[in-house]
Image (tube, rainbow, N blue to C red):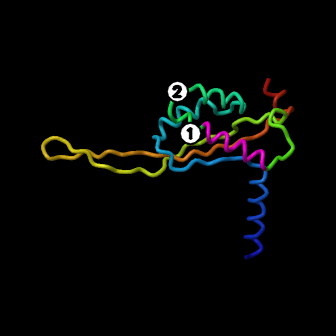
Amino acid sequence: MGARKRITAEKRKEASRNKYQAVLRNCPTSPRKMRLVTGLIRGKEVNKALDILKFSKQEASRKLEKLLLSAISNWQVKNEGVRIEESNLYVSQISVDGGRTMKRLQTAPQGRAYRIRKRSNHVTLVLDSMNKDNENTSN
């Protein structure tokens, strides 16, 4: 491995040490429906976001709740001995991208066929801790 490649790999590793994320791939829900639910928790504190997802009636909220719990456990692995309540975790970034689309055919009148697209999505959730300085400036 060349020196330039090694240096960029070390920078990428260092950046990922401070990044607490979880990724959900090929979730069998359309991206449009998932974006409605992700908009509810974007920028919210972790406990509040969990409450929102728990009491939301959309089916996508169950999958996002599991994803958020996974991101919290990833944070706990990297920060042993630190309490979640003291760290002021919040959902800093959440993005929904289109995933694999399964194409199916449905019979139609007069010998035709309609194409059905069964969409899926990829969700990336990133947590960050809110500093006391950032909290005072936002108020």
Image mark for residue 117? none
Mark 2 and mark 1 in contact? Answer it, CB < 8 Å. Answer: no
Decide if residue 122 is on the left or right side of residue 118. right
Q: Which residue occupies the foreground of this view, 47 or 94? A: 47
- Give me the residue at 76% from left, 59% from top: 13
- Give me the residue at 56% from left, 33% from top: 61
Identified by mark 2, the residue type is Lys
Placement of 11 over or under 121, stated as above or below: below
Element class at badge 2: loop
Identified by mark 1, the residue type is Lys
- Give me the residue at 74% from left, 64% from top: 8
- Across and down, in percent, residue 108 comes to 19, 42
Element class at badge 1: helix
Decide if residue 90 is on the left or right side of residue 122. right
* Image quadrant where one finds the N terminus: bottom right
Residue that badge 2 annotates: 57
As drawn, which residue projects farthest toward the left? 110
Is disc 2 surrounded by few (<14), some (14 to 19) or many (20+) residues within 10 Å?
few
Q: Which residue occupies the foreground of this view, 96 or 46? A: 46
Query: Which residues make up the magenta segment?
Result: 65-77
Residue that badge 1 annotates: 63
- Across and down, in percent, residue 83 comes to 84, 37
Question: What is the CA distance from the residue labelled 2 to the residue labelled 1?
Answer: 12 Å
Q: Quadrant of residue 93?
A: top right
